[in-house]
């Protein structure tokens, strides 16, 4: 029977940040990650200014800056035959006035290398937490299984579930959940990008076709919105027709309608929006998507999860060092992070209602438009109004900062 002080199930951004911070506080930490490495095609590669600030505080900003990345400082719309700037991040407060598009495996590798420098940090790849070890209502640790077929148990003073929106540990704990319907699912795929293309983030909307394009340097990462549950039916036609529908709006993509070989190049994201009513039981805490699955609107799920991890480390590290974590301590983490989660999800539900659903119904059409819609004109002409969306997306509600015990000079 193995034992650690804090067992973290899931080596995503929240789990790796929490593990690094706790290890720097002197807590023995074990992180379980079911894959053999981080080299996978993640759908969320946006690193927002709050996370960039955190990396600076941890002394990792210079190393992060060396990673291959694309810095996005504007959102543009294809209008009247040209690209019109809708939002700019250049007036944001703070040092980082952009969103960094970085392969998530590079970010996770950076966090893992930094955590490995701490003698009490242990990362176990190819190892998945498959269930909870309990004594009555109290969680004592996890059961695990490796890809080689080995199984066992690890006991811990605290178990933290950061294993995503399909969290096995969340289900095992039978925590109550509130869920909201979403109007869409998302198709993800790549299109080639040329040096003559515009840069930044580009939303588009046409006849029952809407989405957003992210500038990744050599290619566009494209997210196309489809009506919820319509994936199978929507794939009946040629994939070329789908890309052609985007090119009707984003006209400079007209030479790339044959870029996708078949529908296998298009991945489906089943969009969910939910939140646990209670994020914890005695001995177990859920963070990130395990506590609150976010819509992809705004691309803020990763950064919200990282903020959860920072708050949890600040509140729980002294308790873990002292050897006693109570339910009340876990409740403090939820109280700290619940308000920004509620506000962020309310913002996403608002965007679903006023932008996503109308676009899918064909009520927002930028194809051939000669002047922006009224809402677009308001955003472009009124500076105060124009500054609100980029601030909320880039910095969010109640941003967290690294606790002093984890800070390092660059």
Image: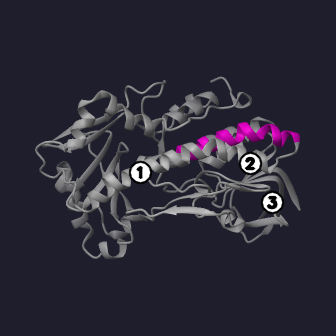
Q: Secondary structure at mark 1?
A: helix
Q: In the image, residue 97 lies at what x, y percent?
A: 43, 29
Disc 1 from disc 2: Cα separation: 28 Å
Residue 317 part of the magenta segment: yes
Mark 1 crowdedness (10 Å alpha carbons): few <14, some 14-19, many ≥20: some
Residue position for label 3: 141
Which quadrant of the structure image shows residue 239? bottom left
Q: Note whether 120 is above or below 49 in the view shown.
A: below
Residue position for label 1: 297
Residue 329 part of the magenta segment: no
Q: Quadrant of the N terminus?
A: bottom right
Mark 2 crowdedness (10 Å alpha carbons): few <14, some 14-19, many ≥20: many
Whichever of labels 2 and 3 marks the residue nearer the N terminus, that label is 3
Which quadrant of the structure image shows residue 197? top left
Which circle, 2 or 3, is nearer the viewer? 2
Q: In the image, residue 12 lies at what x, y percent?
A: 61, 51
Whichever of labels 1 and 3 marks the residue nearer the N terminus, that label is 3
Q: Nearer the viewer, residue 27 or 255?
A: 27
Q: Is residue 216 left or right of residue 76?
A: right
Q: Going 69% across and 42% down the picture, which residue do you hit?
A: 312
Disc 2 from disc 3: Cα separation: 16 Å
Q: Secondary structure at mark 3?
A: strand
Disc 1 from disc 3: Cα separation: 35 Å
Residue position for label 2: 330
Q: In the image, residue 88 lies at what x, y percent?
A: 33, 32
């Amino acid at each position: 029977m193995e034992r650690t002080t804090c067992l973290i199930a899931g080596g995503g951004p929240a789990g790796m940040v929490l593990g690094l911070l706790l290890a720097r506080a002197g807590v023995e930490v074990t992180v379980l990650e079911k894959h053999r490495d981080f080299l996978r095609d993640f759908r969320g590669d946006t690193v927002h200014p709050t996370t960039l600030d955190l990396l600076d505080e941890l002394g990792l900003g210079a190393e992060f800056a060396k990673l291959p990345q694309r810095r996005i400082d504007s959102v543009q719309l294809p209008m009247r035959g040209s690209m019109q700037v809708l939002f700019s991040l250049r007036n944001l407060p703070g040092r980082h006035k952009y969103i960094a598009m970085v392969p998530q495996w590079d970010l996770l590798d950076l966090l893992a290398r930094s955590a490995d420098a701490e003698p009490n940090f242990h990362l176990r790849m190819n190892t998945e937490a498959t269930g909870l070890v309990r004594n009555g209502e109290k969680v004592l640790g996890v059961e695990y299984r490796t890809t080689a077929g080995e199984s066992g148990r690890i006991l811990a003073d605290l178990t933290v579930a950061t294993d995503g929106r399909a969290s096995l540990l969340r289900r095992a704990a039978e925590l109550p959940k509130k869920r909201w319907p979403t109007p869409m699912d998302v198709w993800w795929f790549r299109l080639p990008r040329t040096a003559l293309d515009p840069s930044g983030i580009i939303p588009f909307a046409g006849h029952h076709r809407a989405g957003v394009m992210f500038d990744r340097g050599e290619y566009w990462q494209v997210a196309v919105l489809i009506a919820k549950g319509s994936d199978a039916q929507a794939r009946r036609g040629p994939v070329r027709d789908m890309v052609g529908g985007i090119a009707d709006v984003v006209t400079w993509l007209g030479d790339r309608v044959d870029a996708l070989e078949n529908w296998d190049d298009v991945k489906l994201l089943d969009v969910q929006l939910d939140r646990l009513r209670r994020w914890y039981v005695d001995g177990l805490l859920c963070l990130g998507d395990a506590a609150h699955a976010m819509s992809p609107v705004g691309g803020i799920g990763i950064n919200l999860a990282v903020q959860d991890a920072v708050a949890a480390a600040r509140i729980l590290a002294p308790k873990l060092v002292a050897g006693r974590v109570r339910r009340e301590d876990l409740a403090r983490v939820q109280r700290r992070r619940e308000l920004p989660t509620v506000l962020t999800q309310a913002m996403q539900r608002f965007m679903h209602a006023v932008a996503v659903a109308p676009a899918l119904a064909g009520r927002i059409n930028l194809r051939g438009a000669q002047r922006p819609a009224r809402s677009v004109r308001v955003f472009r002409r009124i500076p105060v109004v124009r500054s609100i969306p980029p601030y909320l997306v880039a910095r969010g509600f109640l941003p967290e900062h690294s606790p002093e015990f984890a800070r390092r000079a660059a």
